[in-house]
Structure formats: C-alpha cells, structure tokens
Amino acid sequence: MKCANYDVYSDSMYVSKGCLNTEDGYTAFKKCSACKSHHYCSVECQKADWKNHKKECKKAQEMNESQ
C-alpha cells in the first residue's frame, strides 16, 4: 500500500495509486507533517509508505526550508 503516490485529477481530488482510496469531497487526505507534499488517506498508509517516502521527504523539507 503506497498512498503517498497519488494522482491529481482536474477536480483537485487526490487518488492514491497504492490503495486507490480517493478523497470523497468531505474528508480531505492528510499531508505528511514534515514535508507537506505527500498526501495519505490514513495513518496506516503513511506508516506503510514511510520506507519509500523517507528520502523524498528529507529532500522536500530541505527545499521548503530554502524558500
């Protein structure tokens, strides 16, 4: 389950590629609190993806701090 990998459709709703959960218009996905760039449908999905997201997260944090 890799919920950090998502597609953004024209209506600005996020869809995770791993579990295929989508925002329903009432409950928005939560962002990674560190980098603010990846969206997750649940804490479980975020934890499951952490190993993959860890390197990207660090890079995104560095970019955010330099702006």
Image: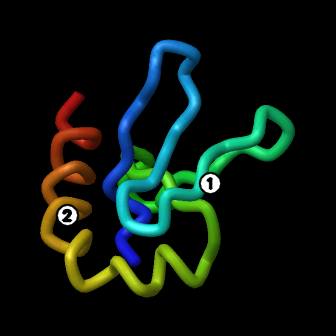
Secondary structure under tag 1 reads strand
Kindly report which numbered mark, 2 or 1, lies closer to the viewer in this rendering.
1
Q: Residue at x 21, y 76 (%)?
A: 52
The label shown at residue 14 is: none
Residue 31 x/y as whole percent = 53, 52
Secondary structure under tag 2 reads helix
Residue 57 x/y as whole percent = 25, 62
Q: Which residue is mark 1?
A: 30
Q: Residue furthest top?
A: 10
Q: Residue furthest front?
A: 20
Q: Residue at x 85, y 38 (%)?
A: 26
Q: Which residue is mark 2?
A: 58
Q: Amino acid at mark 2?
A: Lys
Residue 45 x/y as whole percent = 51, 76
Residue 39 lies left or right of residue 43; in this view the side is left
Residue 5 x/y as whole percent = 32, 55
Q: CA distance from mark 2 to mark 1?
A: 18 Å
Figure label count: 2
Above or below — where is 2 with respect to 23?
A: below
| Label 2 crowd bin: few (<14), some (14–19), many (20+), radius 10 Å | few
Quadrant of the rendering where the N terminus is positioned: bottom left
Name which of mark 2 and mark 1 comes first in the sequence: 1
